[in-house]
Amino acid sequence: MDHTPKSMRELMASAFARYITVRPGGLELRPGETVPALSARLLGFHSARTPYRKRQPTCRSLDGVRPMVGEQTCAACIFRRTCTPQICVDLLADGVPARLLLAFTSLRNFLVFVEGRRREGKAVEGAGVQVAVRNRGHWGEVVFFADGSMTR
């Protein structure tokens, strides 16, 4: 399988992306800097997988095929059943590439957003998007809106 970037945009996004941490109170862009919502451009998205032990990631695959470190494929890994399926969303926020890993409820919200855009005949990649967090107590649920439609 060819793992070369499909475009210069993908190469830049993967090389310089900083990870956004989801907290119940919002999105943490940098340690200690949490915002309730974020306006960004959606660069792209793809599958990912992460196994956790004691709530800590033990490995990560940003394509669902090969881990970021090591030679073994995900299909051959004995811990594959413990992996959390995710979607990796690459964003451009304030001119800076950012990466958001989504699992379960947030993943569903993102897929609903993508399907809605496609149903309307609108592009997904390159779209302006508002990313916000619903406080669920001990965790945050990420929601997505077309840029300018967060008041719905």
Image (cartoon, rainbow, N blue to C red):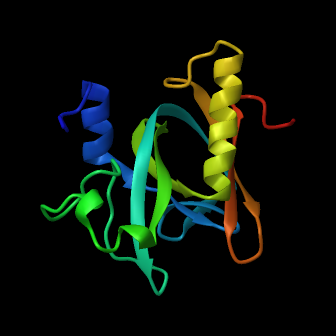
| Closer to the camera in the image, 24 or 106 | 106
**Observer able to see residue 147:** no
Q: Which quarter of the figure has residue 120?
A: top right
Q: Viewed as shown, does residue 25 lie left or right of 45? A: right
Q: Viewed as shown, does residue 121 lie left or right of 30? A: right
Q: In which quarter of the image is the N terminus?
A: top left
Point 69% across, 69% down: residue: 24
Which residue ends up furthest to the top in the rendered image? Answer: 121
Point 33% across, 47% down: residue: 63
Which residue ends up furthest to the bottom in the rendered image? Answer: 54
- Residue 22 rendering spot, x and y as whole percentages: 58, 63
**Observer able to see residue 13:** yes
Q: Viewed as shown, does residue 58 lie left or right of 152? A: left
Q: Which quarter of the figure has residue 50?
A: bottom left
Q: Which quarter of the figure has residue 73?
A: bottom left
| Closer to the camera in the image, 112 or 150 | 112
- Residue 8 rendering spot, x and y as whole percentages: 24, 26
